[in-house]
Image (cartoon, helix red, strand yellow):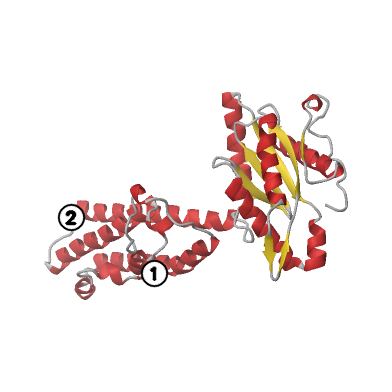
Amino acid sequence: MSPGRFRSPEEGPATPFGLQDAERIVRRLAPALHAHGEWIQSIHATLICRSVDDCKMLCGNSHEVTQLGRWFAEETSEFICRHPEYVSAMRYHREVFSLAQGLCKAILDEQPIARTAYETFADAINRLDRCLETLVKELWDLLRYTDPLTGIATRYAMLPRLREEHQRVGRTGLTSSICMADLDHFKTINDSWGHHAGDVVLEAVSAYFVRNLRRYDQVCRYGGEEFVLMLPSTTPEQAVPIVDRLRRGLASLQIPVGDKTLQVTASFGIAPLRADQPIAVSIERADRAMYQAKRAGRDRVEVWPADQDEQESAETAPETPPQES
C-alpha cells in the first residue's frame, strides 16, 4: 500500500498498531501541527494585508512541502492511513490550500475577496482542525491508557468499559462476569531471576491472555502481577470453563528468558457484574474469590458464592491477602 492511501476493508485488516507507533507519530505530528498553526496565522495576515509577494509563493502543490503535508505523504502506518479522520484531514488539508490559492488569486488580480469565498476557506480550516484534534486525542488516549510494559489496557482504561458493560447489564437484564487473575509466586521469579525476567513473564502472560480470550472479552493489567478479565454476557457458571481453559494453557506456556525457560501459573477468581451492585463490589468479590483460590492451593479457579450476595455488604473489607502470592 502506498503511503497516505486509504486502505479499503476488502484489503483485509491493518497491521497491529501499538505504543511505539503512537509515540513515533506524536513525535513527528506535534511540530507539524505547530508549523500548520503558524501557516494559518501567516495566510490570514497575507489576506488582510493583501500581500502580493506572499501570494506569489502560494502556488502549485505548495501544501506538499509543508511539515503537515509531508507527514500525510510519508505516513506508513496502515492503522492511521485507513483511519477516517486521517483520510478526511488529508482531503481538507488539500482543500484549505486550494481555497487559499483562490483567495490569493483575487489579490493578484486586484479583485476584492468575496465574503462567501473567505467563509468557505475558514470552514475548511475548522473541519481540518477538528479531524486533526480527534486523531491526536486518540493517539494520546492510547499512550495514556495502555500499559507501557505489556501493551494491554491499564485499569484506568478498563473502568470506562466496565461502566458501559454495567449499564448494558442494567438495560438487558443479562449477567456478565469479572475475573481477577494473579500470578502465583511471582515474587520468587523477581527474587531468583531478576526483575527483567519478571517483565518478560508479564509481557508473555499478557500476550497469552489477548490471544486466547474471546474477541469480545477484555483484559487489563490491574496492577503488579494482577489482571482483570471482563466477560460480557457470561454468567459465573459459564465463565468457569472459559477461565479454566486459560488457566490450563497458561500453566503449560513456555516462556523463554535468556538461555532459560520459565513456567508460571495463576489463581483466578470470578464474580458476577450485577446491575444492582456497584462495579467496585464485583471487583472486590472477584478479588476475594481469587484469594480463596490461593488458599486452596493456587493454580485453580474459584467463584464467588452466590449465597453470600445477601450476607455481604458493599462495605465489607476484603480479607488480608497472603504474604506470598
Residue type for callout 2: Ala
Report the residue marked by disc 2. 114
CA distance for labels 1 and 2: 27 Å
In this view, the residue in front, 74 or 216, is 216
The mark found on residue 116 in the picture is none
The residue positioned 80% from the left and 24% from the top of the image is: 307
Look at discs 1 and 2 and give the one toward the viewer: 1
Left or right: where 148 falls relative to 90: right
Q: Position of residue 91 (x, y in %)?
A: 29, 56
Q: Position of residue 185 (x, y in %)?
A: 81, 55
Q: Secondary structure at mark 1?
A: helix
The mark found on residue 35 in the picture is 1
Left or right: where 130 falls relative to 194: left
Q: How many marks?
A: 2
Decide if residue 285 is in sight here. yes
In this view, the residue in front, 299 or 186, is 299
Decide if residue 155 is in sight here. no
The residue positioned 74% from the left and 35% from the top of the image is: 281
Q: Quadrant of residue 122?
A: bottom left
Q: Secondary structure at mark 2?
A: loop
The residue positioned 37% from the left and 54% from the top of the image is: 82
